[in-house]
Amino acid sequence: MALAVGDERMLAAELFNRVWELLERTDRTPADDDTMLHMAHASRHHWGQVGEPVNLVRGEWQCSRVYAVLGRAEPATYHAQRCLDLCVEHEIGDFDLAYAYEALARAAYVGGDPTAAALLEQAREAAATIAEADDRALVEADLQALTTKHPAPASD
């Protein structure tokens, strides 16, 4: 039985928002982590049924973020790359493109990938081109937090 388009959109958005609630919690249990992961994928699935390309981009980004938060670099990288590929394929730039690079950098840091700093720089360059000041500030704050959590190695 297929869901009505409106119901599917509402479900996709509700799942997406519920994932955010769990991401922001500091007292998540292993069961909460599982729920968060499954809801991120479910949201992306439902957006795949009824969403626009930008919804797919954001769904892939959220899957990547969840995996990164859970310390799982390989799937975080996979979904970050899907996010970037969808941005390129559908010519989606601005905020979403900057977050695609942010996701790649975050996944690289989680996995100890030496390309993390270069990916972070690509994210900063993309963020600098965001038209809306509030959106630009949001991305820049996330990039700064990522830098704080994963500082560059000290040089001799």
Image (cartoon, helix red, strand yellow):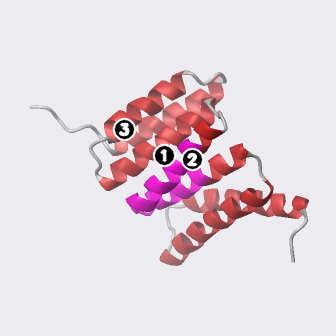
Q: Position of residue 152 (x, y in %)?
A: 26, 37
Q: Measure how far apart labels 3 and 1 are at the Cα level.
A: 13 Å
Residue at the image point whose x is 36% and y is 40% from the top: 148
Q: Which residue is mark 1?
A: 103
Segment tinted magenta in the rendering: 60-85
- Disc 1 from disc 2: Cα separation: 8 Å
Q: Secondary structure at mark 2?
A: helix
Q: Is residue 113 above or below residue 46?
A: above
Numbered disc 3: secondary structure? helix
Q: Label 1 amino acid?
A: Ala
Residue contact between numbered discs 1 and 2, judged by CB atoms under 8 Å: yes
- Toward the left, the furthest residue is 156
Q: Nearer the viewer, mark 3 or mark 1?
A: 1
**Residue labelled with disc 2:** 83
* Number of numbered labels in the structure image: 3
The quadrant where residue 90 appears = top right
| Membership of 61 in magenta stretch | yes
Badge 2: few (under 14), some or many (20 or more) residues near its Cα, within 10 Å? many
120 drawn magenta: no
